Amino acid sequence: MKRTFNIADLFELVADAMPEREALVCGEARATFSELEERANRLAHFLNDQGVEAGDHVGLYMYNCNEYLEGMLACFKIRAVPINVNYRYVDAELLYIFDDADMVACIHGREFIPAIESVSRSAPDLKLFISVDDGSDFELAGIGAREYEAAIREGRPGRDFEERSDDDLFILYTGGTTGMPKGVMWPHKSVFFAGMGGGGHFHPDGPCSEPEDIVSRATGGTGLSGIALAPLMHGACWWYACIQLLAGNKLVLNPNRSVKGEQVWDIVEQEKINTISIVGDAMAIPLLDALKENPGRWDLSSVLNVGSGGAVFSDSKQQEFKQIFPNVLITNVFGSSESGQMGMDSGQRKAEAGLGNVVRSQFMDVIVEEEGRSPRRAQLGEMGIFARSGHLPLGYYGDPEKTARTMIQVDGKTWLMTGDVARLEEDESITVFGRGSNCINSGGEKVFPEEVEQALKAHPDIVDCLVVGMPDERWGSKVTAVVSVRNDKKIVLDEVQQEIRGHIAGYKLPRELHVAAEIERSPSGKPDYQWAQAYAASRRGLVEE
């Protein structure tokens, strides 16, 4: 069978080259590449036998577990499309994604049977349910579900599948900060190169030229070991999982339902983890706190890299990791569900402003949109929107209008507009500032919340924070911070302003400060700015000047 840049083809090449190498660990569950391959084949045949065909959409509705990735691979093997389902959805949101994604089947944790039962009658196309044992005892009969391990036993272990294509779809539903999520439609080849580095992350020869190159790109010896701390329903974790498996590395999943520092470092020590993937400060903070509270408790000599992507990884938290791990590479990856990876900053950012710097290339640039004029590439020193070309998604599933707003033509090429404001520097690097839709206009000055948040997190008593704009009679919008503090410490607005004045310009300083017991974020660590605005508007936790 001809091999393509389809992820199932690539995985099969790796599994055949190193069948006995350990591939996947989640808690007590462990699998070699050959075991993962066989179980995915069996599930793929079961799905096929139940009527799931090429192009059909299959929900993955589980906490982190080996079965999540078995389900992903099984779908890819029969050219079906796995759909990530947020396990925190309530009825209306769950029905929305079942309907919006046109699902015909769902592989789910058994504990979610009541949630599925409450909405399944309103999703008539969703007819096949496969239930993964998670220790709960809800009745499968309630939704007519099949038991997962029984499906594995019933399916055939062989690999007699039809030929696949580079253009088969990998759909990733974005969490979104406002409104309902949308499915980003990635052809396999595009997501492999844009989101997964083309197989070149761990090899000096870089990305693959041919599908068969994936075998030589798989690391030698016993392979590296990497842990992803986010839930697999989040794109940063899902793609990281694919990167590790296609590199022939051991992928370790966080089996716990939150990031607790002591639990994570126990796993890192036990599995001799080399690379740790986090999502911003929400995960960095508990990891750092555990290390500071338990000096010398763990042997962490195996760690080579701590990398973040998908949310702000503040400079202060990066510096704390560097102090604890002076010989470990600390990295911050820029990108999104729509753009894939758009460059990495390892701390060498400009002293002035911004969240970090990446290299401009023929595929990465700043695009300027001016009213009444055609969009154009920025000139040196200009601000615009961070954008990419080259390997791109097709757009948003079922939403051509949003697709047209996000993917535009410039100089005869298609560019994806990330929504992040950026500046093209004089040295042709790109400084990224943050999401333009969150930008606060205060007295005519533009303030990016992420910059202020970075500065606030350098304060020794502030654990976490979100910054929003609130209505102000004089300034139009005033910079307002909602923070959580260590050990119930009392903080004063004036003192906080003085502390962070050395990090940001005066007009960016918070003019109002609210203390909350905890900053609300998604399970992946992404900020909930709507919650922060509502909290500030309620006047709760207001700190007087």
Image (cartoon, rainbow, N blue to C red):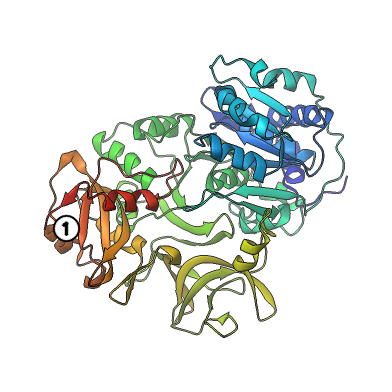
- Residue 212: x percent and y percent? 77, 50
Judge by depth and name the residue closer to the eye, 162 or 383.
383
| Residue at 47% from the left image edge and 84% from the top image edge | 380
Residue 15 is situated, as x and y percent measured from the top left of the image, at 72, 37
Residue 545, percent from left and from top: 11, 58
Q: Quadrant location of residue 492? A: bottom left
- Considering the image in quadrants, where does the N terminus appear? top right
Up-down relation of residue 375 to residue 255 (above or below): below
How many numbered discs sit on the rendered protein? 1
Q: Is residue 105 visible?
A: yes
Sort mark 1 into few (<14), some (14-19) or many (20+) by Cα contacts within 10 Å. Answer: some
Q: Is residue 493 left or right of residue 101?
A: left
Tell me what residue is drawn at x 24 percent, y 35 percent: 293
Q: Which kind of residue does numbered mark 1 sit on?
A: Val
Q: Is residue 256 left or right of residue 44?
A: left
The answer, for residue 192, to whether it is visible in the render is no
Figure check: 439 above or below 291? below
The residue labelled by disc 1 is 496
Q: Position of residue 140 (x, y in %)?
A: 65, 17
Of 536 and 152, the residue lying toward us? 536
Q: Look at the numbered disc 1 and give the secondary structure of its residue.
A: helix
The residue at the point 77 percent across, 54 percent down is 167
Judged left or right of residue 513, residue 333 is right
**Quarter of the image where one finds residue 300:** top left
Query: Compared with residue 2, is residue 39 higher up or lower down, i.e. above or below?
Result: above
Q: Is residue 408 left or right of residue 455?
A: right
* Residue depicted at x 58% and y 53%: 201
Q: Is residue 291 above or below residue 176?
A: above
